[in-house]
Image (cartoon, rainbow, N blue to C red):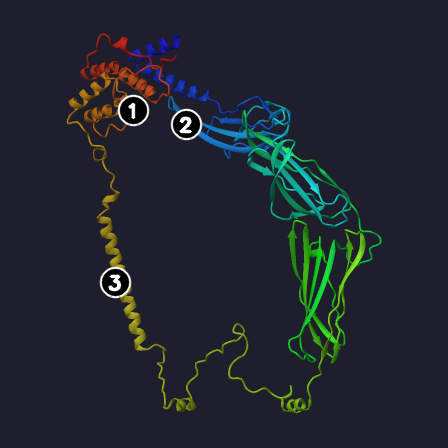
């Protein structure tokens, strides 16, 4: 209060030095008030104690505008699952300063039970303080029969498979309630080749008096290493509706252990193939009814292996003999997936060219594999039906015909055009040669070409002169156009005057002043500024008045103080009381008349009423 009275005493005395001191004090106060607002990051939780699988919300507030890329949430990933993030911003203005507030709401799911700490979150160059959160174990959800609403069970078709043997992994989801936003895990292991088998199968099953919907999802798994392998537990996370509201649950199955058996020592095959059953079939098709030496036959070999992928079937070697030549094509792979497993197949096509007449007999196809059901070595083979190959026809006529063919040493006939590819064929260079007598005779007459000694004809000089004339005329026209352009400026670039941009609505100063006094007496703070500028423009002209600051400069100290008070209340978010315009009306009448009113000093209000 002492500072307030001292400040008012300085303003009330009309001395230049004290007036300057008061203005400097006002500027210092505004600077200090803005500097007291230090930039900071504040973190808060919607609850400090939560139960297991319950969602909590973390709110981050930054009291500055330069937030960079936003909050760095990576420190939260160790103890929480980040489910979502939203952002909003607010701006406030007070005492001529602006404040930016940025908010982030982060939805978190704790990963474990106990007391966890939310570490400092960095936003820009600032960070928040750590916060402690207590996570309590939630009681298990059970229905009236004592059964959980969601269960997850896993099972395998073989506990002790052989290396690379097919294992069917079944994951069964039991639900008695509706699941929302369900997120299921996918089986994975570095020593297992896993892929989906068939689409999900659904049925209903009653367990301990509770009816469940059972969704079965099956996978194929092929162990790639012998020894014990542990398939990690499968999990599902979803939202369910309970009697107390929505709740997120997380259910997991028991882990599965596989004891993988290595390749038996009794297996003598070159390539290891574990399978339930392998079948081989072959066919030899001929292009005509009586194939001869040199004709092409198609040998097709089909191999199918139950419980194995097509890539596991060993490759076959094909060797030519004196009786035939073999040209195999790349094999075609295919697999057929059913509820009982996968059946891999290879289809191989081989071109056979007989080189000798007589009976053509192709070798048998034999596949060695390990029978996983009987746990013994087994073979699958197939034989190809033999066919008769006829000899070549009589070659006497062929010898006579070959005698008439030109030998390699005979020259080739002349070609009329190049037979090389287009990209390689070169065009011969055209040379300007004087016409000869022979060429003139071919054209049917004599052609004489006359050239001047300098190489330029009259036609060339005429064209050059016309081009120079056109360039000169274009230059003259360009100069004239620029002069006219400079002499007549575009009216669209002329800046409109203040009278054109904002014309006055009153006829003279007296009517504008009367409207201003009525505005003050009616306490209409929103209409004060336009009425004030209207009167000032009549009084001092548009060249002197651009804003309310110009009016403060031209009027008295009392009017300036009351205008500053009105601006503070206009831009304040929470004004302490309603604006009273009568003191400003009295000060304006005192300024225009030059006569002070006796009650003027008592009607002045302080510049900072909240001090």
- Which of the labelled discs sits on residue 549, or is there none? 1
The quadrant of the rendering that contains the C terminus is top left
Element on which disc 2 rests: strand
The quadrant of the rendering that contains the N terminus is top left
In this picture, is 155 found above or below 112? below
- Which of the labelled discs sits on residue 219, or is there none? none
Q: Which of the two labelled residues, at mark 1 and mark 2, occupies the earlier sequence position?
A: 2
In this picture, is 8 found above or below 511? above
Picture quadrant of residue 208:
top right
State the CA–CA distance, disc 2 to disc 3: 63 Å
Question: What residue is rendered at 47% in x and 31% in y?
Answer: 87
Residue situated in front as seen by the camera: 489 or 322: 322
In this picture, is 128 found above or below 332? above
Q: Residue 6 location in percent, x, y?
A: 36, 9
- Which of the labelled discs sits on residue 91, or is there none? 2
Q: Residue 294 location in percent, x, y?
A: 68, 79
| Left or right: 568 as drawn, with respect to 411 | left
Picture quadrant of residue 370:
bottom right
State the CA–CA distance, disc 1 to disc 2: 25 Å
Is there any visible trace of residue 597 in the rendered image? yes
Q: Residue 187 location in percent, x, y?
A: 66, 42
């Amino acid at each position: 209060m002492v500072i307030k009275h001292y400040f008012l005493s300085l303003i009330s005395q009309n001395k230049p030095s004290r007036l300057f001191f008061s203005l400097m004090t006002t500027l210092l106060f505004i600077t200090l008030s803005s500097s007291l607002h230090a930039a900071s990051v504040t973190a808060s939780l919607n609850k400090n104690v939560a139960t297991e699988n319950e969602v909590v919300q973390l709110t981050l507030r930054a009291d500055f505008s330069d937030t960079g890329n936003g909050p760095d949430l990576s420190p939260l990933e160790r103890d929480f699952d980040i489910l979502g993030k939203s952002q909003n911003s607010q701006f406030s203005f007070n005492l001529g300063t602006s404040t930016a507030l940025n908010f982030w709401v982060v939805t978190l799911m704790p990963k474990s039970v106990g007391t966890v700490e939310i570490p400092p979150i960095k936003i820009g160059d600032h960070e928040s303080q750590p916060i402690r959160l207590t996570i309590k174990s939630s009681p298990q959800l059970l229905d009236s029969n004592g059964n959980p609403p969601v269960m997850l069970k896993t099972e395998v078709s073989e506990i002790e498979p052989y290396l690379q043997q097919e294992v069917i992994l079944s994951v069964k989801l039991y639900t008695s309630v509706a699941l929302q936003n369900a997120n299921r895990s996918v089986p994975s292991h570095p020593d297992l080749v896993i892929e989906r088998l068939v689409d999900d199968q659904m049925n209903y099953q009653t367990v301990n008096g509770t009816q469940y919907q059972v969704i079965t999802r099956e996978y194929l798994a092929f162990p790639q290493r012998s020894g014990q392998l542990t398939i990690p537990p499968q999990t599902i996370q979803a939202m369910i509706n309970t009697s107390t509201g929505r709740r997120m649950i997380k259910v997991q199955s028991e882990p599965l252990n596989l004891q993988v058996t290595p390749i038996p020592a009794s297996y003598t095959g070159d390539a290891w193939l574990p399978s339930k059953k392998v079948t081989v079939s072959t066919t030899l098709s001929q292009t005509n009814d009586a194939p001869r030496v040199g004709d092409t036959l198609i040998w097709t070999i089909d191999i199918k292996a139950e419980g194995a992928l097509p890539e596991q079937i060993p490759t076959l070697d094909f060797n030519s003999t004196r009786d035939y030549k073999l040209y195999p094509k790349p094999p075609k792979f295919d697999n057929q997936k059913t509820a009982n497993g996968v059946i891999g197949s290879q289809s191989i096509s081989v071109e056979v060219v007989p080189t000798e007449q007589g009976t053509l007999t192709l070798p048998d196809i034999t596949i060695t594999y390990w029978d996983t059901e009987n746990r013994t070595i087994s073979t699958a083979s197939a034989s190809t039906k033999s066919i008769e190959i006829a000899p070549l026809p009589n070659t006497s006529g062929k010898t006579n015909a070959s005698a008439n063919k030109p030998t390699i040493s005979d020259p080739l006939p002349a070609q009329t055009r190049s037979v090389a590819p287009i990209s390689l064929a070169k065009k011969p260079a055209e040379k300007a040669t004087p016409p000869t007598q022979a060429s003139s005779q071919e054209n049917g007459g004599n052609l004489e070409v006359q050239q001047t000694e300098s190489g330029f004809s009259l036609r060339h000089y005429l064209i050059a002169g016309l081009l120079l004339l056109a360039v000169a005329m274009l230059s003259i026209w360009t100069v004239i156009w620029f002069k006219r352009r400079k002499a007549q400026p575009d009216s669209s670039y002329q800046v409109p005057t203040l009278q054109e941009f904002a014309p006055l609505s009153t006829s003279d100063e007296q009517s504008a002043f009367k409207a201003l006094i009525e505005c003050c007496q009616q306490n209409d703070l929103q209409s004060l500024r336009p009425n004030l500028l209207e009167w000032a423009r009549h009084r001092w002209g548009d060249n002197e008045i651009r804003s309310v600051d110009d009016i403060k400069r031209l009027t008295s100290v009392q009017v300036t103080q009351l205008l500053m008070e009105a601006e503070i209340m206009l831009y304040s978010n929470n004004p302490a009381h309603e604006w009273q315009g009568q003191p400003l009306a009295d000060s304006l009448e005192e300024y225009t008349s030059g006569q002070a009113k006796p009650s003027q000093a008592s009607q002045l209000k302080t510049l900072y009423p909240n001090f």
